[in-house]
Image (cartoon, grey):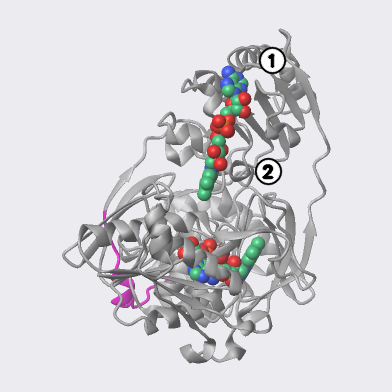
Amino acid sequence: MNIVVCVKYVPDAQGDRGFESDHTTDREGVDGLLSELDEYAVEEALKIVEAGEGEVTVLTMGPDDAATAIKKSLQMGAHKGVHVLDDAIAGSDSAATSLVLAEAIKKCGEVDLVITGLASTDGVMSVVPAMLAERLGLPQVTFASELTVEGGTVTIRRDNESFSETVEASLPAVVSVTDQINEPRYPSFKGIMAAKKKPVETWSLADLGVDASQVGLGAAWTTVTDTQARPPREAGEVVTDEGEGGAALAQFLADRRLA
Amino acid sequence: MSEVLVLVDHVDGDVRKTTAEMLTAARRLGEPSAVFVGQGYAAAKEELGRHGAAKVYLAEDAVYTDHLVAPVAELLADLVGRVSPAAVLIASTNDGKEIAGRLAIKTSSGLVTDAVDVQAGEGGVTTTQSVFAGNYTVTSQVGTGTPIVTVKPNSIGVEESAATPVEEAVSVEISEAARAARVTARTAKEKSGRPSLAEAAIVVSGGRGTGGDFGPVEAFADALGAAVGASRAAVDAGWYPHSHQVGQTGVSVSPQLYVAAGISGAIQHRAGMQTSKTIVAVNKDAEAPIFELVDYGVVGDLFTVLPQATEKVQEHQG
Ligand SMILES: Cc1cc2nc3c(=O)[nH]c(=O)nc-3n(C[C@H](O)[C@H](O)[C@H](O)COP(=O)(O)OP(=O)(O)OC[C@H]3O[C@@H](n4cnc5c(N)ncnc54)[C@H](O)[C@@H]3O)c2cc1C
Ligand SMILES: Cc1cc2nc3c(=O)[nH]c(=O)nc-3n(C[C@H](O)[C@H](O)[C@H](O)COP(=O)(O)OP(=O)(O)OC[C@H]3O[C@@H](n4cnc5c(N)ncnc54)[C@H](O)[C@@H]3O)c2cc1C
């Protein structure tokens, strides 16, 4: 079983995230890291391979520093990494991102499963998995909160507000996993040491046969025309309950016609 | 005037409020055409007309519900090819975003997700998003193809505008590839009788501070006619179902009023509620980060503050 896990390198949500003057994400001002939601994807791939056999390749598209996301995944136990790195990629929208990732997955050879997180923690679009499935012509079984792979079939459970569904498809397939699916492991000391020897390939757009005119800010189908920091919320009133706190709260709501 | 396609968000004909919001937004861009996929159109018909759907495309074949998202994307791609709409509006649900993603690739069109506003601008359709946990407002335009926009529930004011929709049954040859993912079982969740979280005008949420007793949270919610939400800590502890989690990896809400009880205000929680109009918190710890966001806060024990507030609200309602 060969699994490719897509992992994104994102600005830390704890930091002061913002934009550059060309409206692309500011990647200098805030530390980056492996999108936390992609740890669940790495963990699930490792569990599948550990229960049988095969290899986990982690794939990222991003600037130099994105190697950090690969490193963390290798420390967790992934076998090898692929980093698509090319200056022309900067500012890509979701369509271009999915194009580059799809071509990189094809170049990885025979792949049984592509696993992704449910969303990145910066763009939070939740569309890249569906776009990958569309581009690769593969079935998608997404937002999995439980997953089993057996005899060439992948079966997942998927929940929304109204339903709980079971969905299945034959391999190869694209899967996205939610944060309900498992508990990602921490890299062990052994894992950290082993990661240093694991192979990481760096591919350019030319290696993928993708023309630079198809990606990047200039080629984006969606253009950000303005980014504004939201004015900070005005400090509200905070009272300490000395027996009448609930009544005061009810009065506040009544005054605002909220109750 | 160009058509604007609105994919109806419904459960067996029970139309969600998001649909009325999208029809309202669609009227700013052109002539709204609702696309109704699945069963139960009879129940939905009046609601669609009331919000100005000039046309309804009806696709009732089971193929759309027996498979995940791909057939609906094929149907919409076919319609986009036929009517060259000014835009396609889809609800920002998990399914909606994925349908939009596939449609964007099929039609080589730009995509904006989680829009909180949609307007007709000089250079075409202009969208607004609230990003980075609500700390930035982003305006975008789609420069290629048909603007495909997923609209975040509860963000656009609904206006009625009566119309008698022309109905047209549509059927498309769905590819084998789109049938590849099969839904093999579907169980409906129990209804709580409370409003749905994403659409509720008021949400009362409980966190780890409830210690597992959501009684006071539910009672206050019921006094206010609110939906009940929960923090991830409460959900992970098994105190409340995951479908009620508010935040980055749960439901994202922007109600008129959000009440956080026993919730510290971690960035991932804030990401899902920071755009609420009015924010109220009850927390024992005066240093809790949630107090940085509030319009009104009470430092105190939720087990005494909420019941008192509930009683007063009920008295007030008389
Ligand atoms: C605040 C913000 C708003 C944006 N809004 C838009 C918009 O409206 N329209 C638009 O077209 N683009 C938008 N973008 C750009 C978009 O986020 C990027 O193109 C991105 O790479 C794809 O979308 P996502 O990160 O939201 O992916 P999601 O679809 O949320 O990611 C799902 C999964 O896909 C995989 N994945 C995604 N990107 C990568 C990657 N680079 N490398 C490896 N795996 C990856 C991961 O497994 C991830 O968990 C926005 C970006 C930001 C920062
Ligand atoms: C990738 C990722 C995604 C995440 N997604 C989400 C998400 O979608 N939603 C989410 O909520 N979290 C999410 N989290 C978790 C988040 O980081 C916090 O751990 C979580 O929000 C904490 O929940 P809490 O506020 O209920 O608990 P705590 O942080 O433990 O806070 C409990 C609060 O209750 C107060 N309290 C205790 N007793 C009482 C009492 N009797 N009366 C009043 N106050 C009391 C305490 O003072 C404290 O402030 C995510 C984390 C990660 C890493």
Q: What residue span does the magenta drawing correspond to?
A: B168-184
Residue B148 position within the rendered picture, expressed as x and y whole percent measured from the top left = 59, 70
Residue B238 visible? The answer is yes
> Which chain does the numbered disc 1 sit on?
A
Query: Which residue is at a point 44% across and 56% down the rendered structure image?
Result: A39
Residue at 41 percent across and 61 percent down: it is A193
Q: Is residue A116 visible?
A: no
Please, is residue B48 above or below residue B122 in the view?
above
Side of A59 relative to B184 (left or right): right
Same chain assignment for discs 1 and 2: no
Report crowding for label 2: few under 14, some 14 to 19, many 20 or more residues within 10 A (C-alpha). many
The amino acid type of the residue labelled 2 equals: Gln
- State the image quarter where residue A29 is shown: bottom right
Residue on which the image places disc 1: A246
Which residue is disc 2 drawn over?
A: B274
**Percent position of residue A80, x then y:** 38, 72
Numbered mark located on residue A33 in the image: none
Q: Residue, x 76% and y 77% (percent of image)?
A: B123
Q: Quadrant of residue B95?
A: bottom left
Mark 1 vs ligand 2: CB below 8 Å = no
Task: Pick the residue in front: A187 or B123.
Answer: A187
Compared to B302, does B76 lie above or below?
A: below
Label 1 Cα crowd, 10 Å radius (few <14 / some 14-19 / many 20+): many
Quadrant containing the N terminus of chain B is bottom right
Return the residue nearer the eye: A80 or A158: A80
Q: Contact, CB < 8 Å: mark 1 with mark 2? A: no
